[in-house]
Amino acid sequence: MKVLVIGSGGREHAITQKISESPRVDKIFVAPGNAGTSQIAENINIRVDDIPMLVAFAQKEAIDWTIVGPELPLVLGIVDAFENEGLKILGPNARAAQFEGSKAFTKAFLKKYEIPTAAYEEYTSLEAAKAGCAHFDYPLVVKADGLAAGKGVVIAQNEAEAFEALDDMMAHKHFGDAGEVVVLEAFLRGYEASILCFVDGETILPMQAAQDHKKAFDGDLGLNTGGMGTYSPSLKIDDAMMARIQTEILNPFITGIKEEGIDFKGILFVGLMIEGDDINVLEYNVRLGDPETEVTLPRLKNDLMDIIEAIDQQRLNEVTLEWSEEHAVCVILASGGYPESYEKGKVITGLDKALNGYVFHCGTKMVDGQVLTNGGRVLGVTALGETLEVARQLAYEDVEKITFEGMFCRTDIGVK
């Protein structure tokens, strides 16, 4: 079997690693890939949004399955383009990808199908949005409706900050078309949790929960990031809580997409905010999360290709996910200055000495035989252990062996 993985981050490296362990897979291509994927697959220099080129490559190489990592090509309709050519691809089509491509679409869906979420209003004019701020208390969440590379969400502490965010999104077009519609949303307190699910349109099958750490610095201080580390399984979500999530969050999603005639096949990422007995949906993503994937897939015992084919054939109800009893911890090594401005092209050393688990490449490139930094989040150092503490210890042992100029990480991943 030939497989094409689309993307260049740690999530895609983890996907590539997982499918490389399948006895059914003979050859893996990654477009465009990174220095890590090049060690276990063949990188192809095609951008994730160059859909015609990706289709042509899949046809030329007779690719059996394509797996899409990032959200952009999904929202752009890559699944529709591949399926129109009779090519197998894992991911939701363009209509289903609106769950990530439009926050207003998702909030309306949540409200219609009585899936708990924060109170909200949507606006298409700057003046109306500013007037709407009076309907909410502070802090207030201001969201650009469309894709904004994870940066289109502002938690405003007062009216001045809310107005500034609205000006940036709607008047100054800092996020392009993504800010033509904005959503104002009540601020929720509690702790975040991530549930990744396989979906075949009839059945939604959750993976074991992961716990992300969003803030840049120890103690949950600093700016929000794409994720500075994660661990799995979550110690905060027990069987009783998971049963409630299935009943109150996941099952109504399936009911809703069937009633709406939305053909959703692929991955649903459910971002939750939990406080006491209250469970609310923060967001839907239509692909695997990053860095959640880096602790989830290493613990999954099933052959990922078997699950993908079950999704295609709507046989997820026949699948039982099997999990390692070990705990997994992933520590992100980031470039100095992240999540704001940072430099690229720094030489990374010590990768050959980090042998306790996996080093997933999030933002790297290979130049003249050297691995260089090529992003804000550079590496995801993952280790597994009998307990969470053992996994933490092994991961941080490997972290100590890796260096590049400006490197920083949180030292408290998994402590809470």
Image (cartoon, grey):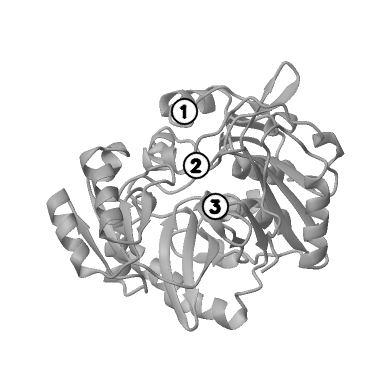
Residue position marked by numbered label 3 in the rendering: 289
Quarter occupied by the C terminus: bottom right
The tag earlier along the polypeptide, 1 or 3, is 1
Amino acid type, mark 1:
Val
Snapshot quadrant of residue 10: top right
How busy is the neighbourhood of tag 3: few (under 14 within 10 Å), some, or many (20 plus)?
A: many
Quarter occupied by the N terminus: top right
Amino acid type, mark 3:
Gly
Q: Residue at x 60, y 45 (%)?
A: 11
Task: Indicate the position of residue 380 as horizontal and vertical percent values.
Answer: 68, 45
Vertical side of 294 occupied by 260: above or below = below
Tell me the element at label 1.
helix
Task: Indicate the position of residue 72 as horizontal and vertical percent values.
Answer: 42, 39
Residue position marked by numbered label 1 in the rendering: 55
Residue 156 falls left or right of residue 297: left
Task: Indicate the position of residue 66 as horizontal and vertical percent values.
Answer: 55, 38
Front-most of residues 389 and 29: 389
Snapshot quadrant of residue 262: bottom left
Vertical side of 62 occupied by 20: above or below = below
Disc 1 + disc 3, Cβ < 8 Å: no
How busy is the neighbourhood of tag 1: few (under 14 within 10 Å), some, or many (20 plus)?
A: some
Q: CA distance from mark 1 to mark 2?
A: 16 Å
Snapshot quadrant of residue 362: top right
Tell me the element at label 3.
loop
Q: CA distance from mark 2 to mark 3?
A: 9 Å
Front-most of residues 409 and 113: 409
How busy is the neighbourhood of tag 2: few (under 14 within 10 Å), some, or many (20 plus)?
A: many
Residue position marked by numbered label 2 in the rendering: 70
